Image (tube, grey):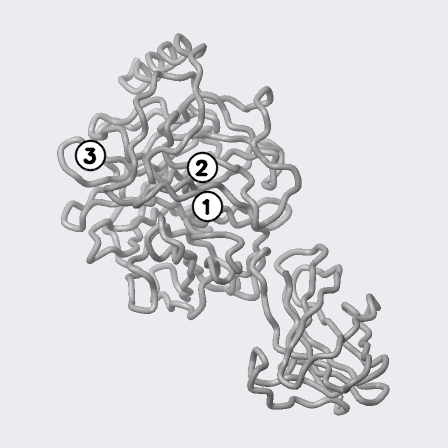
Amino acid sequence: MSGTAISAVLALVVALAASCLPGAAGPGGGRRGAHSAAPRPRTAAPPPAPAGTQAPLTPPGYSPVEPVIDGWFADPTVIKVDGRYYAYGTNNGDATMPVATAPSPEGPWTRSPGDGLARLPSWAQDGRTWAPEVVPPRAGSGTYVLYFSAARRDRDVQCIGVATSASPAGPFVPVDGPPLVCPLDLGGAIDPSSYIETDGTRYLLYKSDARKTAAIYLVPLTADGLRVNGPAKRILGHDRSEPVLVEAPDLVRRGGQYVLLYSAGWYFRSDYQTRYAVAPSLEGPYRKQPRPVQSTGAYGDAVEGPGSADVLTDETGDHLVFHGILKHHGGSTVDRGMFVASLGWDGSRPVVRGVPARFEAERGRLNGCVAALPRPNASGGSAVGPFDRDGCRLDVPVFAPAAGRYAVRIGYANRSGGPAHLQFSANGVAGATFALRETGDSDWASGTVGAALNAGWNTLSLSRVDGQGQVDYLELR
């Protein structure tokens, strides 16, 4: 019997012996930063299995701006196996790699008992086992591959290890030998992320961990994903437009481009955010885009510090799995929960449901009866109006990341001194009659209507019913 198999059997025996010991979830080691709180000592626990007897973790009523796991579950990644979803997270107080399961990405999520990682490799020590990545079997191998970051025993750096399991629930058993990736001259490595080309060639992305030189690297792997198969290439670094540093890569191909999602900033601060860069080829050059995909400000403070994003693809489309800050404990210690939101693509541009998207009225189609009017206090410096005759109409193209019902906030002004109404419609289907209440000379107001939208581009229209008014913007929420 091989050393790996003996270790797996021993881990299982110890785990079963401790299966009656209680455990409660709580704050533990943080994902990044040497000052993150280390998990409290724990006893061995049984390997996780598909749950079904534990209480659901998901609060009643799904929302893309509410955590689906309302507790410690940082740096999440999710896969789907045989109709069930499996989530894996950074170490907490009870597990080196916590595991949760659900019947759908939105939940309800149930934490599996025990630990998804049977043990750490001989080169690693407890306390900083971060950002797992699990890759389902390929080409009939039957082997699930886990990549993870862990702290070295012999020096103060983290490196990337690899483990395998015959089950998505684990326990994953580390591959013997040295770390898979450990560039000591770059301060070690964290945040492993798998990418597999259409021809089956495997790659691993990771972050070099020295503060001043932190960057995203890409390295080829062997066909089984267990060994490095060539030199690493630096594909993305930090610049002054971003907070502090870059990390947490995730690579997909959409709209004919390679799209690299990554996080910028310190994970324990409110300015932590998800950004993206695009490239025509795998190795780049990657061109950074000016606006974050997610940020505390973009969410209007509904989600704090959104980041460590991972793309989950199933038969319904793409979902963005990420964490957000739930509670601050001082310093770099924070609780982070798992969020899931529908992810749409306008070509190679990612659009996340739950992040309000504003479309300026003056960029819509005007029918000649209305015009773009300079208005310094309007959100884009202009508004559309005055809707003073029958037949006046505005059509605004808007992009929805997924099909469903949306709230549409309409910014407007009514300085006519009397009542005014506009007929709202979505894709030619009449909806509510929207009332424009009277506003002051320089004041703007807003109101909300509902609309059923298709995934992708839609047309929202406003046409005159009576009175006069000006429209500033339409915002999907």
| N-term-proximal mark, 1 vs 3 | 3
Residue 31 visible (yes or no): no
- Residue ID for mark 2: 73
| Image quadrant in which the N terminus is located | top left
Q: CA distance from mark 2 to mark 1?
A: 8 Å
- The quadrant where residue 192 appears: top left
Q: CA distance from mark 1 to mark 3?
A: 26 Å
Mark number, residue 472:
none
Helix, strand or loop at disc 2? loop
Whether label 2 touches label 1, CB < 8 Å: yes
Q: CA distance from mark 2 to mark 3?
A: 23 Å
Q: Please report the residue visible at 64 percent of the width from the left and 90 percent of the height from the top.
A: 373
Q: Nearer the viewer, residue 125 or 202?
A: 125
Q: Amino acid at mark 3?
A: Arg
Q: Please state the horizontal and vertical placement of residue 240, each as a whole percent of the image.
A: 29, 68
- Residue ID for mark 1: 323
| Residue 62 in the figure: left or right of residue 217 | right
Residue 77 visible (yes or no): yes
Helix, strand or loop at disc 1? strand
Q: Please state the horizontal and vertical placement of residue 39, each as a whole percent of the image.
A: 32, 29
- The quadrant where residue 123 appears: top left
The answer to whether residue 471 is above or below residue 156 is: below
Query: Around disc 1, counting alpha carbons within 10 Å, would you say few (fewer than 14), some (14 to 19), or many (20 or more)?
Result: many
Mark number, residue 152:
3
Query: Around disc 2, counting alpha carbons within 10 Å, would you say few (fewer than 14), some (14 to 19), or many (20 or more)?
Result: many
| Image quadrant in which the C terminus is located | bottom right
Single out the mark in the foreground, 1 or 3. 1
Q: Please report the residue visible at 80 percent of the width from the left and 89 percent of the height from the top.
A: 388
Q: Please state the horizontal and vertical placement of residue 432, each as a whole percent of the image.
A: 82, 66
Q: Amino acid at mark 1?
A: His
Q: Amino acid at mark 2?
A: Phe
Query: Around disc 3, counting alpha carbons within 10 Å, would you say few (fewer than 14), some (14 to 19), or many (20 or more)?
Result: many
